[in-house]
Image: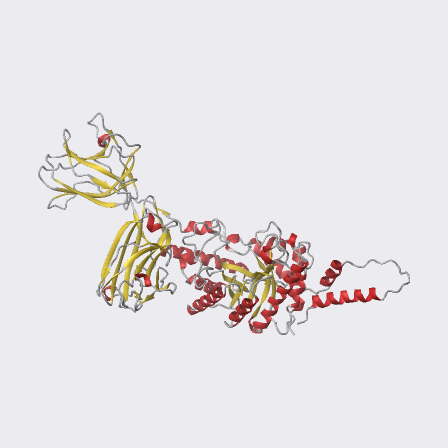
Amino acid sequence: MKNKYINKLGLFVSALILVTSCVDNEPLEFKVDKPVSVANQEVLNAYSPLKTYIDRGANPDFKLGAGASISQYNAKGVIYRMLNTNFDEITLGYAMKHGAIVQADGSLNTSNVETLISNAKDVGITIYGHTLTWHANQNAEYLNGIIADREIEIDPDDANNALLANTPSANANIWDWQLEYTLPTSLIQGVEYTLKMRAKASAPFTVGFWRTDGSSTNYGPDIAFGESWGDVSVTFTPTIDATKLQFCFGTFGGDLYFDDMVLTASGSAENLIENGTFDDENLSGWGKPGWHDYTFGVEPVAAGPATWWTNLITNSDVEGDDVSSFFSTEVTVGPDPATISAEGTGAGDVGRAIVVKSGDNPTNPWDTQFFVKAPQQLEAGQAYRFSMKVKADKPATIESQAHNNPGGYLHWSMVGSPSVSTEWQEYTNSGVISAEQAGASGMNTIAFNLSVFAEANTYYFDDIVWEIEASGNTIPLTPEEKADTISWALENWISGMMEVSKDYVKAWDVVNEPMDDSSPYDLKSGVGKTDMAADEFYWQDYLGKDYAVMAFNMAVQYGNEADKLFINDYNLEYNLDKCKGLIAFVEYIESKGARVDGIGTQMHININSDRDKISEMFTLLAATGKLIKISEMDIGLADGKQTDSATEEDYAAQAEMYQFVVQKYFELIPASQRYGITAWSPLDSPTNSSWRAGQPIGLWNLDYNRKPAYAGFADGFSIE
């Protein structure tokens, strides 16, 4: 290896020694030796522009890139000239991302990008598109807004109101608050009646139920109101010909809701309550009692809608191919999407079903699990309804658990323990999520333990419905509605960005940083996070793994046929499993018919990074046959050491690491797969920077003087 920086500096120092050794005893003209620091800088200044060191004959398509600020580049100052002189391509750190372009109303403001393209075109430097889908630097407020609970406009012909009785405070006696209904037809003494309704309260309370003829009162069964909507009923036999119903709740302070009221006599289906649904806001017959001086009556109002239930599960009937709600696992194997059976094998021999096989000789009931995952966190107090159709090859009883994501155990019981036979049967469960089931940050997964018996079995699941209750004047979008809305937003963004840039931008990071650091074969997720940044949004939480398939297909559809489309991630040299996980994800994307041209490895490293792992990463990436790009390289000192404490030894080690990385890239990546290398931070980082603040990571210092790292970078392009 020929190290030009070391060789030039060595020649300079040798010459200096030779001159001083030839001095005789005769007086000479006074002379001051040049400081070593000045001499070294002259050696660095003698280097040619970086891009001239690339062998274009062997690497005709290689791009030497640099990270750039759009404002600094468009200002056409020192940085503009430095980038144009030394690099083939620029990558914008923020300016071409969703958060910079998409406005509050969803429109795209591309004026700065258009100016950038014009300026770059003038000097012939190319632009690398960065980035189309990422979880950070997004206009998350807009994206969350378009999938927020929607307002419900109450149509008088199709409303869903309830009767609301509000008491400002609890009083001393049960009769101190009352609500009265005057019956259109008197109840008959001795006839059995049943009153059914749906009811809830702002806090659990037992309402006293009376019926009266206007001058005397008969006491009847009480009615328990829960905090969530529930069906309640009372059966009674009047001892008088009652003309009114009274509901007494004087010791309660808060809201009581009544809905879907049906009063029938034994043997009759006629509802004796007019407008028991309250949907047309007709409160005829309802009012506050006025015949007792001590009665504090409640004025009833129609409050709607009463309730809505929304299904959290995508592809509940298993007729589609999306299995993002369903996972299965065996012992230590991580959760994988569950498999779908053939057509005609679903419940009732119609459609399809989820199939899960339990392993032989289990040690624990949870050695094989089937997971049903919701797209959002559910908190304690949330009402739910669950149902599914299930069968197995052998009769069994399965257990359920509450999890935060598949495998994140919270509580031993969630929706009971279904008994499963060899015939399809429906299992239902409902209730309110407890504090133990919700855990500290909420739950989103029901786990079914399938290894309760010590033998293998095969289970079949179909028509899985997990609903939550919503009340008020809004209703959550279903997972399908959210997926449809987010896929539209993704297409609107990618198509708009391509429209303004496709004539000049020919390469893109289509998907950025998809893999999870702690579970490197899985995708990142925002589900369960309690510290989401304002610009953080995970497309995959709504579109599943296929969000990347969609993004690559859209990039092809709206871009140029010959564009180079990349997937990009960090720490691939630090966590080789993450590198393998990213490669596996590329294989999945292409198995779904999309095209991935290249893989970017960011390489934000330091002088002590593991060189063997760096070499192994390049070997793994080269084996994919894809274009390989070092997409965001910068190299810091040990332990985040700052510029103000850096030594000459530190800078020499940094130069050596820059040289090593570039050298290994050219050594291990075949020429046909070398897209290029991008220096992410050409200058050292200022102390007020949001990126590696105060660290000397660049090839130039903040005074625009070349550093030894410049020489190491340039020398890396020369291989003996």
Instruction: Determine which quarter of the picture holds residue 650.
Output: bottom right
What x and y, as percent, mark residue 712? 65, 65
- Which of the pair 138/183 is nearer the observer? 138
Quarter of the image with the N terminus in it: bottom right
**Residue sitting at the far left:** 190
- As drawn, 289 above or below 682: above
Residue 370 makes an appearance in the image: yes
Quarter of the image with the C terminus in it: bottom right
What x and y, as percent, mark residue 441? 39, 50
**Residue sitting at the far right:** 26
What x and y, as percent, mark residue 718? 65, 71
On screen, residue 530 versus residue 168, left or right, reads right
- Which of the pair 37/425 is nearer the observer? 37
What x and y, as percent, mark residue 93? 56, 56
Residue 61 makes an appearance in the image: no
Instruction: Determine which quarter of the picture holds residue 34.
Output: bottom right
On screen, residue 309 versus residue 79, left or right, reads left
On screen, residue 362 versus residue 713, left or right, reads left
On screen, residue 111 versus residue 474, left or right, reads right
- Which of the pair 121/552 is nearer the observer? 552
